[in-house]
Image (cartoon, grey):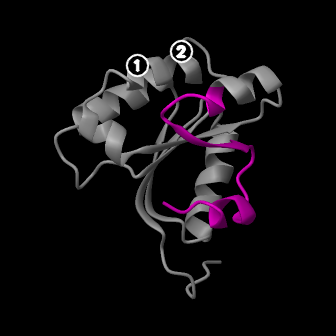
């Protein structure tokens, strides 16, 4: 049930995770808590990068928040961040990357948190408290 008392925080969110169950839960949490009007879900880092390249010229459809999983096959979250750095400046300026991971490895947390494009590190699954703490 939606909480209609809350204003919607963001227009668009991109959720990148290879796990369909995590995507379902996190997308539901985002919409139920009025965090974003639209959630685009991509099941791989590669498809997310292609999506961002495809919409690069249209600021009106760029996501304001990107929730990024670290542990994915083929290209992991760190690989995504390396390629993200090569995307147009408009994307890198407008889109805030939040790592959303099940990893509790201090090495992963430190590596992600010190990346210049990562603004926050959050453990899965998303919850209302995490979403309320996100303000840009």
Magenta-highlighted residues: 112-136
Q: Which residue is mark 2?
A: 75
**For residue 87, side relative to residue 129 (left or right):** left
Task: Please identify the quarter of the rendering in which residue 92 is found.
Answer: top left
Mark 2 Cα shell of 10 Å, populated few (<14), some (14-19), many (≥20): few
Residue 11 pos. (x, y %): 38, 63
Residue 83: numbered disc: 1
| Quarter of the image where the N terminus is located | bottom right
Left or right, residue 73 beside residue 128: left
Q: Is residue 67 visible?
A: yes
Decide: few, some or many residues near mark 1? Use Cα within 10 Å; few <14, some 14-19, many ≥20.
few
Residue at (23, 37) in percent of width and height: 56
Nearest to N terminus: mark 1 or mark 2? 2
Q: What separation in Å lies between label 1 and label 2 (alpha carbons)? A: 10 Å
Relative side of 117 to 28, left or right:
left
- Residue 70 in view (yes/no): no
Q: Front-most of 77 and 107?
A: 107
**Is residue 72 a member of the stretch shown in magenta?**
no
Asked which quadrant contains residue 86, the reply is top left
Q: Position of residue 91 (x, y in %)?
A: 30, 39
Question: What residue appears at the point 68 percent right and 52 percent down from the top-left corner?
Answer: 25
Which residue shows up at 40% across the image and 52% down it? 64
Q: Secondary structure at mark 1?
A: helix
Q: Nearer the viewer, mark 1 or mark 2?
A: 1
Q: Would you place residue 104 above or below residue 97 in this image? A: above
**Residue at 54 percent of width and 71 percent of height:** 34
> Residue 121 magenta-drawn?
yes
Answer yes or no: do the residues labelled 1 and 2 have beta carbons within 8 Å?
yes
**From the viewer's perspective, is residue 79 above or below residue 20?**
above
Say which quarter of the image contains residue 102: top right
Above-or-below relation of 37 to 119: below
């Amino acid at each position: 049930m939606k909480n209609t008392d809350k204003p919607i925080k963001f227009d668009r969110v991109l959720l990148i995770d290879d796990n369909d169950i995590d995507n379902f839960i996190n997308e539901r949490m985002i919409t139920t808590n009025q965090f974003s009007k639209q959630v685009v879900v991509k099941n791989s880092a590669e498809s997310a990068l292609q999506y961002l390249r495809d919409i690069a010229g249209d600021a009106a459809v760029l996501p304001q928040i990107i929730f990024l999983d670290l542990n994915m096959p083929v290209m992991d979250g760190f690989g995504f961040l390396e390629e993200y750095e090569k995307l147009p400046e408009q994307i890198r300026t407008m889109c805030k990357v939040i790592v959303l991971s099940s990893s509790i490895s201090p090495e992963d947390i430190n590596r992600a948190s010190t990346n210049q494009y990562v603004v926050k590190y959050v453990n899965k699954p998303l919850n209302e408290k995490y979403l309320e703490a996100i303000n840009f």
